[in-house]
Image: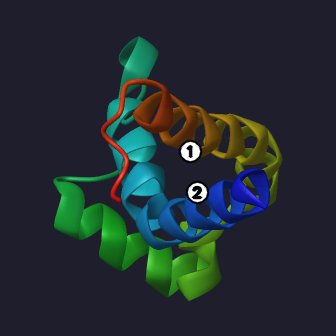
Amino acid sequence: MKLGLGALSGLFAQTITYPGDTLRRRMQTNGVGGAERVYKHTWDCLLQTVRKEGFAGLYHGLWVNVIRCLPGAAIQFAAYDALKVLFGAAPK
């Protein structure tokens, strides 16, 4: 049960924050290797992405990331709860 709830919590958090990760990655690779810069700043990156690819462009690669994060989030939440009980910090 705790593994499932941990996985769902991780999935929810990942889905909410993923557009920020997309913008961060695009800005990090903007002008790499001497290529011409495509974006002037983060706001420009957001506007160009939505104009060219639609709102869904902010979520490119989400499913691969979900597959990667689900096991980790599930284990993290379950381990946290188990350690709280082990060390006596669980609510009574």
Q: Tell me residue 53's x, y (percent).
A: 61, 78
Q: Earlier in the sequence, mark 2 or mark 1?
A: 2
What element does badge 2 sit on?
A: helix
Residue 54 visible in the shown view: no
For the point 57% across and 71% down, which residue is it? 12
Above-or-below relation of 90 to 72 = below
Q: Name the residue that disc number 2 marks.
A: 10
Quadrant of the rendered structure where residue 56 is? Answer: bottom right
Above-or-below relation of 79 to 43 = above
Which sits in the foreground, 43 or 3?
Answer: 3
What element does badge 1 sit on?
A: helix
Q: Tell me residue 14's x, y (percent).
A: 54, 59
Residue type marked 2: Gly
Q: Name the residue that disc number 1 marks.
A: 77
- Mark 2–mark 1 CB contact (< 8 Å): yes
Q: Tell me residue 63's x, y (percent).
A: 80, 58
Which sits in the foreground, 68 or 4?
Answer: 4
Residue type marked 1: Phe
Which sits in the foreground, 69 or 33?
Answer: 69
Q: Tell me residue 91's x, y (percent).
A: 33, 57
For the point 56% across and 69% down, which residue is it? 15
